[in-house]
Image (cartoon, coloured by chain):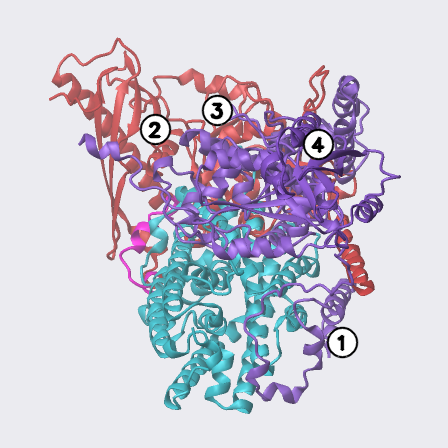
Amino acid sequence: MFRVLIETRDTEFVTTQICAIFCLIGIFHEFPAHNTQEVMRVKFRDLFLYSPERDEGVFILDEPSYPPTDYDPQMNEGGPELTGSYKKDKAAFDREMEKDLNGDLKIREFTTRVAGRDVKCAAYFFDGLVDKSGVNDFILRPLMLGSRATEIRSYSDIMNVLLVQSEVKETNTIGTLAFDINFGSVILLIEGYGKAISVDAKGWEHRGIESPEVEKVIRGPNDAFSEQIRESTALIRHLVRNKSLISREFSVGTISQTPVSLMYIKNVAGEQLVREVERRIKSIEVDYLFSSAELEQYLEESSLITLPQFMATERPDRAARALLLGRVVVLVDGSPFAIVMPTTVFELNESAEDHYLRTPYVNMIRGIRFMAFLCSLLLPGIYVAVVNFHGEILPTDMLISIVAARDKVPFPTIVEIIIMELSLEIIREAGARVPTPSGTTLSIVGALILGQAAVSAGIVSPILIIIVSIAAIGSFATPNYYLGISARILRFIYIFLGAVGGFLGITAGAFVNAVLWTCTYSVGVPMFVPVAPITKGGVPKTLVYPRIWKQDYRDDYVNPRRRRKQQSARGWKKDEN
Amino acid sequence: MRRKLLAALLAASVLLSGCNMSTEVNDKAYVIAVGVDKGSNGLLKVTFMFAYPSGGGDEAGGEKVDEKDIVTVEAPSIYSGMRLLDTFKSKRIDTNHTKLVAFSQELAEDRGVFSQLTDLVNTRGFRPSIYVCVTQESPSKLFNSMEPKQDVFIEKFIEHLFSKVAYNATSRAYLYNNYFSAVVEDGSYIMPLVGVTDKEKVKEAAEDYPYKKPDDFALNYTADEVPLHGDGSAALCGYGVFVDNKMVGTLGMMEGTIVKILEKNKNVGQFCVLYPDRDSYANVNLQLTNAPIVTVKTGDAPEIDIRIQLWGEFTGIGRTFRNSEDYESFVGYMSSAFERKTEELLERTRAEFGADILGFGDKAKANFLRYREWKDYNWKEKYKDARFSVHVEIDMNDYGELRFSQRK
Amino acid sequence: MNGGKKIGPASTAILFLNLAMAKYLMVLPHFMVSEVGNSAWIVIFLKGLAAIGLFLLIAALYKPYVGMGLGELTRRALTSPLGGALNFIIVCVMLVRGGMLFRILTEALQTLETDTVTIEYVGLFVLIPVLICALKGFNANVNASILILPFTVLSVVIISVALAPHYEVGNLMPIFGEGEGKILETAFLRFGGTFELMYLMTLSRSMGDYKTFKRGGLIGVGAISLFSFIFTLIYCLSVPYPVSKNFFFPLYQLTRMIKAGSFLQRMEPTVIFVWTGVIICGLSTLVIAAAELLKNTSGTKGGGGFVPLLVMIIFLVGVLPRSELDTYGIYKVVVNISHYFYIGVILAVLLTARLRKVERGLAYEA
């Protein structure tokens, strides 16, 4: 049928080709969300037969389902139980901990005195993970000397009288012992006791609380999360100071057992949100997890979209604010960045300082930032489109100077701009790797290549350097690092589209981009939420940052339990009158 | 997956063919102005003025390159002229940056320019907001005489010559205005007239200056005798009058000023007012206070009533009104002169040209409810019996006096 | 939280605008001017009022069935084979109209782009986004058009402000143009907005309830009436009558008249952004609605599978006419006939459903 249709018009090559594309995409392409196969199986008579059972609502993308795995998570849990015999248990535990292979495993054997007789003891710990003086003073000294000075009547007195640590517990499975010892506990095996005692003595060397590296502010607190999950949670708790702040603990990674903390405020965060995040964290089945950046990728919905779907912050105040606004914060041990979820594009475009600035300043800065992002995304593409297709848009004087500058350049604009963009990316990448002493050399060389030399060699035209630099600077002005990278990637696509289709191509690309981005969800919340889809009163709030005493409500798209944030925040104004 | 890849490849190959369709900016030659003249054997002599890319990106600067490149070809139309030009211009001809289309007076008088106007409006290359004009000389001479002294680029010169920057700005210079009038008013319209100044002509005119024509604010020059002391430079010197799409006459400087007032241009400009006794003069800056009120009564003979309100002040200290009599006589003198000049112009359009070139038809239409009735009325014929009444009110102030502090 | 299956009144209005914008902004002013002369703006105004009245009437009839979708309702009201056949015919009319619209708008885009680009090539840039958008589904389409709408509004505002020096009240005279009889006939005997209304009803299962449907529809009808009224008024004010009949793309001609000073030498290319966006939005809504109807008709699980097929058919229908003028002719005929068809179908289905007391299925409660 289509063949006939085509031939009625003077068949052109392009027409046939385009038809072929649609045919290929349409008929053979299997979209996961839509059952193409099923549609193809519809027979003509089916069109006239109705069966409501087969009808399942408006088509919306289904959640992708993953195939079941044959993964064995039982790697650290449980294990054999202690037998009660000191010798056997010690041998078993030695074997479990690979005593001969692990150099940093320390075993101190001694005797203590229980109920008037000496019993054998062994203390296991990893050198470096424990606080040595603490072990000496508060574990070994009481057991060896204290037991002889005080009368220890029974084994339970060891825990009740001798060990003065805050965290002491009895265990009788070897697996749990192994887990504890890896977290900086000292394991005590005592002859005749039957169980082992695990005493918390964490004390490894780590970085202290320092000022933030990425999110620097001028007005505002200057402390940042550290790699210690406990310190990080403490920093947040210190800011929130409320009993309803919940910090749920999970360990992710079958081998690494990385502690992950899910924080939310019980009376503020939406129940559904917390449950969803919890579900996602719990269902991660991996061997190891080191940082929140990895966790982010396990939690996000669309991994191929360039848009980042969570916000990472290294500032406790920002995390605390997010919590109080009904978000959920996830911390990972070993990573100084907290993940805030859900987030929106407009929040990604906020900097840490926005809340500390007065309203007029914020609005101006946000406008600039938005412009910078658009420049970094579209400017090179638009330049290519203008130069290749829409020369008439430029003022004649400017056009003539562009022509004069370009006349000496042998390449077409697209090649020219790709050369420049690529060399810029290379320099940027090198700049991230280069050791500090060589940094100056790099910047000199880069400036020379990108600036003077390329122009005088006649490879690029000067106006192009302006365009490329504005775009590059624009991506630095974007507060979110991932969003900046996203703009860098998409820029190349827009350059290509501008070269093949002018403004038409750019618009088509922008439309597809808009479709894909608005279809991206952050834990179920659309990324463009107050605007697309529209929520009540969301648009003006997004366009213009309201005065702080007018921000009475939390965003409704996170479904907070407590909608109102403040009430008559400026009561003094009323009193005056 | 393989099919996905195939579709993507095919799409990319089609898309890449788009690169073929684009043209780099520096592969085009930009036409700044087009001139159309009468050629031999019924052809047109089409003149193109190109912009040279120079100076722009050059750091060295150096000597000034001639920025113009003027080529003339004979062809049946502007477009075929461009096609011909393509054979010996190395770059593709681009008319998107055209600023001016100039028709020679000879062509306008002989064949008219309507078909060219239609061509220009309906094609992509030219746009309706370019300027059009009639030249007294041949277009190539006009283009050669365009010597930008105040402007760096030639296109800025053209822009400024017609645009609002200058006092003689007029919407009649736009292509679409002329085209609209040509269609709507049955081919009666006026188009700016551009000439090239000439030393000889200046000499002749200067012999009579300024006492030849009293009471006319020293502006009463017909289009071909503007006394400019230039040596061959392009100058705006009035309007060409088109009736039935053919040029039949010209309007001079004073008439042009009245056209401007009727067009609601606020700044009327500087006037040198010669006194009746002819031994002294005063400089007056005139402005429109309100838009002129034009009422048209459509009867058997249309009655056109025009009320113009002007406000003026002396341009410098030194001339003041001694008393109210002085004021009355001065103002009365000026307004009567304006009234007379306006009436003369209107009478001329009726009697000499016999066409509504100033577009009173727009006002007359409002008296009708349906388009058909308006067509049946036959404004074009009726205009030949039109009666005019003109009232000009002028308020004068001393230099520096507030506008509303009326003396009385 | 859950991806927002239902949309609110604002989004419903935008969906309506989405469909209407492409047609009303690009094609309608010229159509109206060629029918009734320089009084097109009066016609559009009256048409707007008539459309609001019509909408209220149909909304009242449709009240019990909001959330059911037209395709579904047709089947229930007119029994399966008949309703199915009707749905099939509706889809065919939609596709023909969509194809013609596609051709006309693409032709306009090509005029804006460059002389050298072929129509098929331009079509590719329109249809591939349409394909992706329609496959991504209903919400994606609404969201994308929300992002585009401000730019459309902005462009109309900019054009109307920039054209202010060209406004000439004389161009509106004589006030009744080709006669008041013709004005009334065009305004009230041709049912404007039925095409869009039909889509709205087709997609109504994505809207919350009757209140959403009614409020959104009213805002949509009102906004598009206002828009096209303003735009047609601008067109009539700045271009005198016999000339305005000759201009095919009002938006294009109007932007050509703008003189932006020395900032932009020409304004036309900037219109491409808005124009393309509006066209893509409109066409993808059309495709989604057609797929939804087909889905209702065939009872398949998702309508997405139909999308590529529909897009291809639109393309093929679009390239069928030999020239742009042919397309205009066909489109004019289709438009002049199809609105009777639409209003007939809508009223027939609703009235039958009411008479037969068709009830909403359990699946659509709440």
Residues beneath discs 4 and 2 located on the same chain: no
Q: Secondary structure at mark 1?
A: helix
Task: Give the cyan chain's letter.
Answer: C
> What residue type is disc 4 on?
Val
The first of marks 4 and 3 along the sequence is 4
Cα–Cα span, label 4 and label 1? 79 Å
- Residue A3's disc number: 1
- Neighbours of disc 4 within 10 Å: few (<14), some (14-19), many (20+): many
Quarter of the figure with the C terminus of chain A: top left
The first of marks 3 and 1 along the sequence is 1
Above or below for C147 versus A440: below
Q: Position of residue C221 (x, y in %)?
A: 39, 64
Residue farthest along the front direction in this orientation: A116
Q: Chain of mark 1?
A: A
Q: Chain of mark 3?
A: A
Which mark is nearer the camera, 2 or 3? 3
Q: Which residues are magenta?
A: B353-374
**Rendered residue at 52%/87% (across/down):** C83
The first of marks 4 and 1 along the sequence is 1
